[in-house]
Amino acid sequence: MKSLSLYFSPTGGGEKIAKAIQNGIDHNDYDYQFSLNLNKRPVSAETGEIETLPVIFTIPVYGGHMPKVAMERLNTLRSECNQPAILVAAYGNRAFEKALIDLEAFVRERGFNPIAAGAFPCEHSYSTDETPIAAGRPDNSDLKMAEEFGRLVREKILRNDFSSVNTSDLQDEPSPEASLKNFITFVKEYQTQQATEPKIYIPLIDTEKCTECGECSDACPTAAIREDFTTDATRCIKCCACVKICPAQARGFHTPFARPLSENFSERKSPCWIL
């Protein structure tokens, strides 16, 4: 069996999950795999020979939703034959909230039939050594579970079971009540401060460390890195791909969200799915 994997994963966590799921569906057939990295370009409306394959859609979670840029990269894709879709959300250990619901509505509008959905914790974009948030994930355990999820999807398809799933049935693993209260308090205080003294947070560059290697520009999915390696705030989506890839550690993103996320959502969450 072959599948098509479409993923938007600026920092690579979702990409690892997507590949593990595809290995499970394709039964580890490495001869050739159909996949498209959407970090730099949108998917083509013409799918040709892959138009009947099951499609794995993998997106990151931004503020509990499917990010706009992922919608833009997938916007032209259509299915004329009710293609089975596997929906995957990669989230930073806080909550995936409505991201899968968003993705389900998105693919249904384009003619796809969601037959499975899963949510997988991955290292948060804001995670650093000082403020770790799901650091190092997906790890080997996560990837084994992702491949198992793919294997179960494969078995469902081989049974000719193309029954749809309702992603609202997939419940997030609850966080401690005190942690949620702490985070809500922080968000309210942040919103109040932004209303009176708005501040834009973007990745910054240490010019003394920067070697101008260009890896940050290559990694940025929205072309937000200028020629002088500063960041264009109007393009930046705060994915921190530029920060994580910089070999000289010359880039940093100092957001007030990092510490409360790290302090309140350190408890390990597990992958979950429905078929």
Image (cartoon, grey):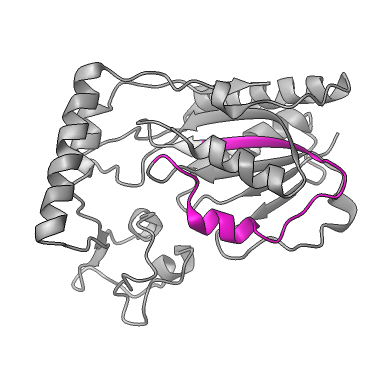
The stretch of residues the image draws in magenta is 64-89
In this rendering, does residue 70 appear at all?
A: yes
* Residue 188 on image: x %, y %: 17, 41
Observer-nearest of 263 and 113: 113
User: On the image, which quarter does residue 239 sit in?
Assistant: bottom left
Relative side of 224 to 90, left or right: left
Q: Residue at x 40, y 56 (%)?
A: 241
Q: Residue at x 37, y 43 (%)?
A: 63
Q: Residue at x 54, y 45 (%)?
A: 59
Question: Is residue 70 magenta-colored?
Answer: yes
* Residue 107 on image: x %, y %: 68, 45
User: On the image, which quarter does residue 16 sit in?
Assistant: top right
**Which quadrant is the C terminus positioned in?**
top right
**Which quadrant is the N terminus positioned in?**
top right
Q: Residue at x 30, y 46 (%)?
A: 126
* Residue 92 on image: x %, y %: 38, 36
How many numbered badges does the structure rendering display? 0
Relative side of 10 to 252, left or right: right
**In the rendered image, the vertical position of residue 30 relative to residue 238, given as above or below:** above
In this rendering, does residue 130 appear at all?
A: no
Observer-nearest of 132 and 176: 176
* Residue 50 on image: x %, y %: 85, 50
Relative side of 124 to 45, left or right: left
Observer-nearest of 71 and 3: 71
Observer-nearest of 150 and 72: 72
Relative side of 231 to 13, left or right: left
User: On the image, which quarter does residue 19 sit in?
Assistant: top right
**In the rendered image, the vertical position of residue 160 relative to residue 217, given as above or below:** above
